[in-house]
Image (cartoon, rainbow, N blue to C red):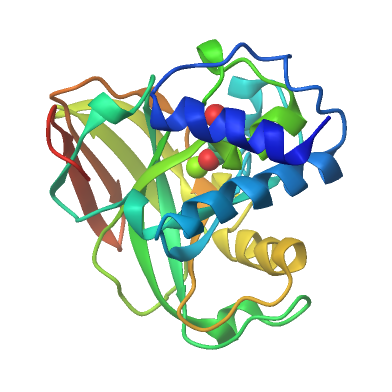
Amino acid sequence: MNVQAVAERLDDAAREARALPGGTTGLTTTDEAYAVQQALVARKVARGERITGFKLGFTSVAKMRQMGVSDLIHGRITDRMEVADGGSLDTTRLIHPRVEPEVAFLLGDVLRPGGDPSAAVAAVAPALEVIDSRYDGFRFSLPEVIADNTSAAGYALGPWSAPGDLGNLGVLLELDGRLAQTGSTAAILGHPLRALAAAARLAGELPAGTVILAGAATAAVPLPPGTHVRATVAGLGTVALTTDKGVTA
Ligand code: 0L1
Ligand code: MG
């Protein structure tokens, strides 16, 4: 297994919106997988993308069940993936996008492994994450999805507010005004702040200004072109985007 070669295959697949068959990377360990992810993200940075933050995946039982895995994973998000709240996401550059409702944190202070996550948080927001596996049919092994930067493809952030009690807030996901998923922030590792603590444990030190997507509160749903999607987190508000052919995010 050649780290750079696998990173290049995944990068090309994303840039050409073309799925790779799962099971063909030769990846067997999570250490190898994170090395590939790092090389993949380095290619994005070399093209001018700026890392804006960190994401956690498989933080809820619903997501673990949906994808048949049982481990927490993490990836990087960049400025190119961000869609303004209420803005448009060009799905022509994606393969088979799905969307999920999340909670995002903004760090006002550095968060070190073992540090108090609530002391480091400046603000919290409702979020949408768009995932787009670079593997055919979202079929992959755990090392493969890690190498693929945990399927990260897009995100939108709603209004930031001061963090209150996030332990059990209702979460709704609507597509074109129809309810698609309901859940609770309690589904995110029992409490979204636990995801933040896990992020610091997994990533090492997280600097002030980092955005952290804490993970989905429900299973992800397919996101076809021409769809208006909205997430509501009780007490935090709403965040929305529209998928629109021909408009670059
Ligand atoms: O929960 C996540 O954001 C991880 C996504 C990776 C797995 C998937 O593609 O569903
Ligand atoms: Mg997610």
Q: Quadrant of ligand 1?
A: top right
Residue positioned 36% across, 29% down in the render:
181
Can residue 211 be seen in the rendering of this structure? yes
Q: Is residue 166 left or right of residue 196?
A: left
User: Which quarter of the rendering shows the C terminus?
Assistant: top left
The answer to which of 177 and 34 lies nearer the viewer is 34
Q: Is residue 108 left or right of residue 25?
A: left
The answer to which of 12 and 153 lies nearer the viewer is 12
Q: Is residue 237 above or below residue 36?
A: below
Q: Is residue 112 above or below residue 78?
A: below
Q: Quadrant of the rendered structure where residue 85 is?
A: bottom left
Q: Quadrant of the rendered structure where residue 220 is?
A: top left
Q: Position of residue 111 (x, y in %)?
A: 64, 81
User: Which quarter of the rendering shows the N terminus?
Assistant: top right
Q: Position of residue 210 (x, y in %)?
A: 49, 73
- The number of discs equals 0
Q: Position of residue 195 (x, y in %)?
A: 63, 59
Residue positioned 22% across, 53% down in the render:
238
